[in-house]
Image (cartoon, coloured by chain):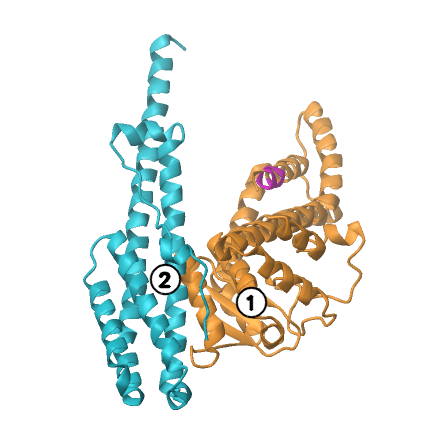
Chain colours: A cyan, B orange
Amino acid sequence: MDATTIILFIGGIVLVSSWLIYNGLVTAKVRIAEALSQIDIQLKRRTDLIPNLVETVKGYAKHEKELLENVTKARTSLMSADTTAEKAETNNQLTQTLKSLFAVVESYPDLKANQNFLSLQEELSDTENKIAYSRQFYNTNVLGYNTKLTTFPSMLIGNLFKFKAAEFFEAEEADKKPVKVSF
Amino acid sequence: MVLFVVFAGTVAYVLGKATGYGPSVGMWVFVMSIIYSFISYFFSDKIVLATSGAKQIKKSDNPELFRIVENLAIGDGIPMPKVYIINDPSPNAFATGRDPKHAAVAATTGILERLNKAELEGVLAHELSHVKNYDTRLLAITAVLVGFISLLTDMFMRQLWWGGFRGNDDERDNRGQAIFMVIGIILAVLAPIIASLIQLAVSRKREFLADASGALLTRYPEGLASALEKISLDPRPLKTATNATAHLFIVNPFKGKNFQSMFTNAFSTHPPIEERIKILRSM
């Protein structure tokens, strides 16, 4: 084998590997976008449940107008949130208002026994699990993508084509504090 | 896996040389094995579900189970598999399906009664991981290889008995053929056993992988660990499991037999439960 053949052979390997690595990076990026939209789907599930909840509670606890208004306001701000950070924050606010609402409901035994209310409560707590899982999936994909961008040799292709690192979904400061349960 | 393929290829080569027919026989047997396995692979989920008496459920039939599977599927980013329940007091669960789009998970009424939510999540995460890691596909391929080797050695032994080898005109070639013949006989006897052992080893490896993937999904390995502990304390074997479906279940459905000896372990589709629990608790 002469020098030209060897060079051509090595060049071929480099080209093919670069092509495969590039495709890997693009695929990882697309997966992150899909995971992000998954989170949105779960958030929407949550906001869809709220109006029904507000109506059910109104029927039994007319005096808690302010609380119910807070819940509705939090829901509206979540629905109009744009960036990932905004969504995380407004979702958190909604969780806080819901916590207050459920705490107050404790003093309305009729409402607590209402089938509709109970199943709504179950659904809502399930959506929180779903949101958590979809965030986990998003973070897993971001981890894979960011790892590719920082390890050799894929980082070379990444820098060459200006791939940017993605952001993890961080837990809110409020979430990290221990929950105070008061009766 | 690669070694398995190489092993199968070696067996085919040796037997081909020994009979004098060369590699063409191997090719035909390979084609037959693939066709056979293709059919069983495509219908494997339906067959398995039918033989185990599983019934599909809707969300309203068992919302807790349904929600757990739904949420785990979101965590793994795969479409939600169909959910089945098997009416049997022995605690066990399995997953089947050639890829995440055509997947199903089943749980016995026994396991649903006995485990709490975190443990059930651990078990179902393990099963879902089998689907995500394409284990059904992998084990189907190993089944192809095992079948291929068995068919080959079977044909070889038959020819040995009934005659029908092609001799060569050249004296030297005949002697070479004789040597291959000897090796061929030894392989014909041992190869199917070796193939089965390799298949079982692959199955055990994938079980460990599913344990780890499941723990990664739930971020709570203790769930699966304590579930395995609870299940291993139950001595009843699963009624509807057969030898063909045993490898799919989360623990070996044929309990009540002595598992302690190393010999039995080599022939088991699942790694020993104590080891699985130990590994999970060390994560």
Figure check: A139 above or below A113: above
**Image quadrant containing the N terminus of chain A:** top left
Q: Chain of mark 1?
A: B
Q: What is the three-letter code of the residue carrying label 2?
A: Ile
Figure check: B172 above or below B73: above
**Foreground residue among A170 and B206:** A170
Q: Chain of mark 2?
A: A
How would you classify the magenta stretch by its main secondary structure? helix
Q: Residue A70 falls in which quadrant of the image?
A: bottom left
- Residue behind mark 2: A131
**Foreground residue among B113 and B131:** B113
SS type, badge 1: helix
**Foreground residue among B185 and A99:** A99
Q: Is residue B135 left or right of residue A119?
A: right
Q: Is residue B268 left or right of residue A32?
A: right
- Residue behind mark 1: B120
Q: Position of residue B76 (x, y in %)?
A: 43, 56
Q: Position of residue B204 (x, y in %)?
A: 64, 51
Q: What is the three-letter code of the residue carrying label 1?
A: Leu
Inter-mark Cα distance, 1 to 2 = 20 Å
Residue B30 shows in this picture: yes
| Residue pictured at 59% horizontal, 77% vertical | B109
Q: Is label 1 in contact with label 2 (beta carbons under 8 Å)?
A: no
Q: Position of residue B262 (x, y in %)?
A: 78, 50
Q: Report the span colored magenta.
A: B3-8
**Foreground residue among B258 and A66:** A66
| Residue pictured at 38% horizontal, 8% vertical | A2
Local crowd at mark 2 within 10 Å, few (<14), some, or many (≥20)? many
Figure check: A32 above or below B255: above
SS type, badge 2: helix
